[in-house]
Image: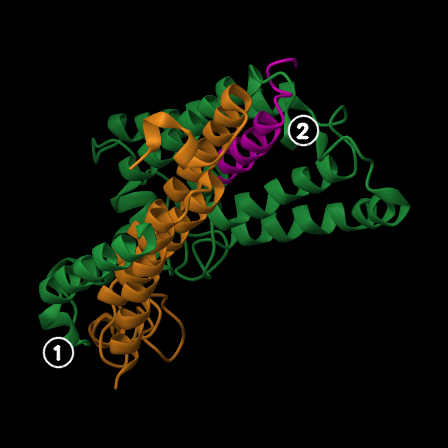
Chain colours: A green, B orange
Amino acid sequence: MRKLIGVFLVLAFLFYLGSLALPLLQDPTPAQLASVGADLIERAPAESGSVNVVTAVVVQFRGLDTLGEVTVLFVSALGVAILAGALRDNAFREMFTDDGGFILQTGSRVLLPFVILVGAAIVLHGHLTPGGGFPGGVIIATAVLVVLFTGGMDRTPHRLLSVLEGAAGLAFVGLGMVGLSSPAQSFLANTLPLGEFGTLLSAGLIPVMYAVVAIKVASELSNVISGLTGEEAHA
Amino acid sequence: MSISAILYAVSFLLIAIGLYGLLANRNLVRMVIGLNIADLGVNIFLVTVGYVEGGIAPIFTRGAGDAATGVASATAAMVDPVPQALVLTAIVIGFGITAVALTLVMRIYAATGTIDSSRLRGLKW
């Protein structure tokens, strides 16, 4: 009965979605961009110096949005730590009491530097290739997850991760404030010289900002994982 | 049938599957998974909205829209960067929601000894 009601509700919702999006379904691919997108693509090379327009949008044109986004991440890490810290017997924590065995331990020791290296490369090329602070930060956070899987709950630098998290958040806001005193007089303005278009040292403040975002994301995700184990409350 | 039409269909299908998972399951962990699937469908929908006929990724490369040779020609060929930036945000927020939801499930299990929503009075329907 419950499943039947579920099917009916979902079908009704699909019908509603379909009727809303009927123009989209009839003519799925527009011949040209909406004005906002076209305008951003036109302005991005000159104003941000970033080859990757998505990066220019995320870090520069909508930088305030990204600040809100890392704040959401921070709040969720905080919520997880508070909710899981009070648990007495934590089932998730028990998953990590095992040391994972010899093969996993040795393999992780070999792999760990390369995982962090790949993450750093993706972060630093954020303005040139697909990627950037968010995917790179997630890759770096997987390194911490591997440490946890090999029974390294005690080796995980909880204190350092908390300090990095706070410092990265402050650095993002601080770098944004620098823009207020620049000629542009706006929060998160691109204050550094833009450099040569398409090279590693270009796009001014964008790679710096994205590196800060990567540190923030990596430490935040590590905190969510170690928060789920309830470890952070004891550290 | 164009790529966009297929992707729209896929995204609606994923949203429907996710909603069905939310409605028809009693297991709270499965409900969180359903929420995740619906989230994925919404993300695919948003990216598809930004697609234009024969579009390329919004990254300037040699040949396809070098800034020096002609930004105007690149603008015509590139897909919309705004929905992609939006989805980047949506993915991160989806992760945060999943983490908090799973922690809540852990708390519910610790408090009541079950993750069956039909045994939790407050969640019965």
Instruction: Report the magenta stretch's main SS.
Output: helix
Residue B95: quarter of image: top left
Which residue is the extreme one toward the front? A1
- Above-or-below relation of B36 to B64: above
**Which one is nearer the viewer's eye here, A217 or B2?**
B2
Work out which quarter of the rendered image holds the C terminus of chain A and state it. top right
- For label 1, count other residues whose C-alpha is less than 10 Å away and answer few (under 14), some (14-19) or many (20+): few
Q: Amino acid at mark 2?
A: Arg
**Which one is nearer the viewer's eye here, B96 or A94?**
A94
Distance between the Cα atoms at labels 2 and 1? 51 Å
Q: Amino acid at mark 1?
A: Gln
Spot occupied by residue B63 in the image (x, y as percentages of width and height): 37, 80
Where does the magenta region start and end? A214-235
Which residue is the extreme one toward the bottom? B1
Residue at (31% x, 32% y) in the render: A68
| Relative to A225, A55 lies left or right | left
The residue pinned by badge 2 equals: A93
